Amino acid sequence: MDYPSPETLRTGGKRLLARVLTQLETHTQDAATAAFLDEISAQPTAHVLGLTGPPGVGKSSLTDAFIRAWRETGRKVCVLAIDPSSSVTGGALLGDRTRLKTDPDDAEVYVRSMAARDRLGGLSDHAVAAIAVMRAVADVVIVETVGIGQSEGDLRQAVDTVVLCIQPGSGDSLQFMKAGIMELPDIVAVTKADMGVLARRAVSDVTGALSLSPGQDRDWSVPVKEVSSQSGVGVAELVGAAERHLRHLEDGGTLERRRLEQQAAWFRDMVSTQFGSHGLGLAETDAGRGLLEGAGRRPFVSFAEFSARMKRRLADEREPSRGP
């Protein structure tokens, strides 16, 4: 299968999108795949929202609520649900796709589950590629992570708006404050608002924790919103906060710059994952050849070129010297 043009992919429906995403997972080393990903990465149309938080906090229910809210306004929504991986097969264990209550006949909603693979709660290279594709075909992309420690930092490198979900009465706010995670979210959602006093106490605790953290964007005050996915309380306010954050990024000229920085970070992460710190060091000294300078706009082709160069180098080093 040849890769379609971005325009064809946008109008080709869920079946074509599914085929493309499957091909990305099975042809990750192809030059054609790298060229396609760089082309489509340069044409984002979607606001990419990342949901993270501990297991059981209600991320899937909140994703459902977000889908309904955005579909009511006519937005096309894609969801990438990152699941823990089986140590035997590498496949997804939880299957978030089966927990989301979407209409299979709605052509404007597409949900895909993907295993975290060897990334502890983070985003694999396949997930990053899927996000790049989804954000070029939808109006909103929701990325739901495993949420077991690493994901918050990785998520920051792939989405526009990070929503940290906290459950009342769980002690999460104290743990997050100790771990420094409060520096990362753009919005905090206190789920299960119907728990009343416990939910209000969680809001107070989190607000206090945020006051001790400088955050990533000093011009943005992180809102803390109570929300109940079951009753719908607070969903509109949370959607409104996400849309205000997008406007904040656009108005300040931050959005394009952040995405270029993210794509350069994708290149570094792919190099580090495949070739370790030694390979990353070589990439950083290779700036004269344009790899790092170009990685922000062509991360996948830059990595394919670097990977081919490293493999040739390693093959040369392993070749035994010939005797006289």
Image (cartoon, grey):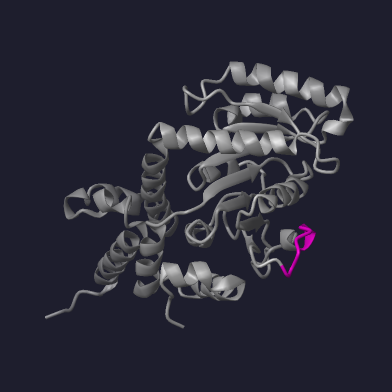
Residue 282 in sight from this viewpoint: no
Q: Is residue 126 above or below residue 248?
A: below
Rendered residue at 76%/58% (across/down): 100
Res. 204 in view: yes
- Splitting the image into 4 quarters, where does residue 90 fall? bottom right
Left or right side of 63 for 318:
left
Secondary structure character of the magenta stretch overall: loop
Q: Give how far across and how far down residue 40 sits, in percent.
A: 41, 62
Relative to residue 81, is residue 244 drawn left or right? Answer: left
The percent coordinates of residue 161 (x first, y second) are 55, 40
Which residue occupies 87% across, 22% down? 197
In percent of width and height, residue 153 lies at 54, 40
Q: Which residues are magenta?
A: 98-105
> Any magenta on residue 244?
no
Q: Position of residue 56 (x, y in %)?
A: 79, 44
Quadrant including the C terminus: bottom left
User: Between 74 and 319, which is closer to the camera in this rendering?
Assistant: 74
Residue at position x 64%, y 56% in the image: 82
80, 238: nearer the viewer: 238
